[in-house]
Image (cartoon, rainbow, N blue to C red):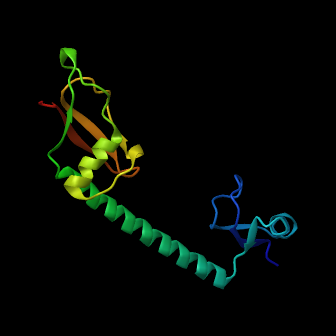
């Protein structure tokens, strides 16, 4: 008689492992605790096939998204620099601050790509000049764009 059984994990549990993985556990543990508490389900051939199909679809979507983000990075690298005009005060200091929305508007004008505010990291800008802006497209995909602050000529 078998002493272990293969199960598919349904709920996040620190001692079992990640959700939708197959694990071999003892029969008594599975039938007396895990299955009655809906932590796992028995891994039949049909369920394993279905799980593999879902994992394949998930990985294909992840690959498509990664390729799309690489294309976005290449489009952003083609931008030489972004120009933003601001009013100047004394000592060549600008009025107000540079916002993420201003940068997003310029990127949309140049590439047609829309970014989110949280993807853009702006340094503290007080004077006219050229600055580097970090753009985090994805966890592993980052790029930099030059930002030039110009005075408004009246």
Horizontal arrangement in the rendering, residue 28 relative to residue 64 (left or right):
right
Residue at point 71%, 53% (across, down): 15
Does residue 49 lie above or below 12 as drawn? below
Query: In what quadrant of the picture does the C terminus appear?
Result: top left
Residue 134, horizontal then vertical, whole percent: 30, 40
Residue lying furthest right in this view? 32
Query: In what quadrant of the picture does the N terminus appear?
Result: bottom right
Front residue of 78/115: it is: 115
Front residue of 41/87: it is: 87
Residue at point 70%, 58% (across, down): 16
Horizontal arrangement in the rendering, residue 26 relative to residue 139 (left or right):
right
Residue lying furthest bottom in this view? 46
Q: Count how many numbered circles sit on residues in the image.
A: 0
Does residue 105 lie above or below 50 as drawn? above
Residue lying furthest top in this view? 91
Quarter location, residue 31? bottom right
Residue 37, horizontal then vertical, whole percent: 83, 64
Front residue of 42/138: it is: 138
Does residue 93 lie above or below 13 as drawn? above
Residue lying furthest left in this view? 153
Horizontal arrangement in the rendering, residue 117 relative to residue 144 (left or right):
right
Residue 33, horizontal then vertical, whole percent: 85, 64
Does residue 147 lie above or below 21 as drawn? above
Residue 125, horizontal then vertical, whole percent: 28, 27
Residue at point 37%, 50% (across, down): 140
Quarter location, residue 50? bottom right
């Amino acid at each position: 008689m078998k002493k272990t059984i293969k199960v598919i994990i349904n709920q996040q549990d620190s001692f079992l492992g990640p959700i939708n993985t197959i694990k071999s556990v003892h029969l008594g543990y599975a039938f007396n605790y895990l299955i009655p508490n809906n932590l796992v389900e028995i891994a039949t051939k049909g369920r394993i096939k279905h799980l593999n199909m879902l994992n394949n679809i998930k990985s294909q979507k992840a690959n498509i998204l990664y390729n799309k983000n690489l294309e976005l990075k290449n489009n952003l690298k083609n931008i030489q620099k972004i120009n933003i005009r601001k009013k100047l005060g004394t000592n060549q200091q600008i009025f107000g601050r540079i916002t993420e929305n201003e940068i997003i508007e310029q990127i949309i004008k140049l590439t047609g790509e829309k970014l989110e505010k949280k993807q853009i990291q702006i340094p503290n800008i007080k004077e006219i000049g050229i600055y580097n802006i970090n753009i985090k497209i994805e966890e592993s995909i980052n790029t930099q764009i030059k930002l030039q602050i110009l005075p408004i000529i009246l």
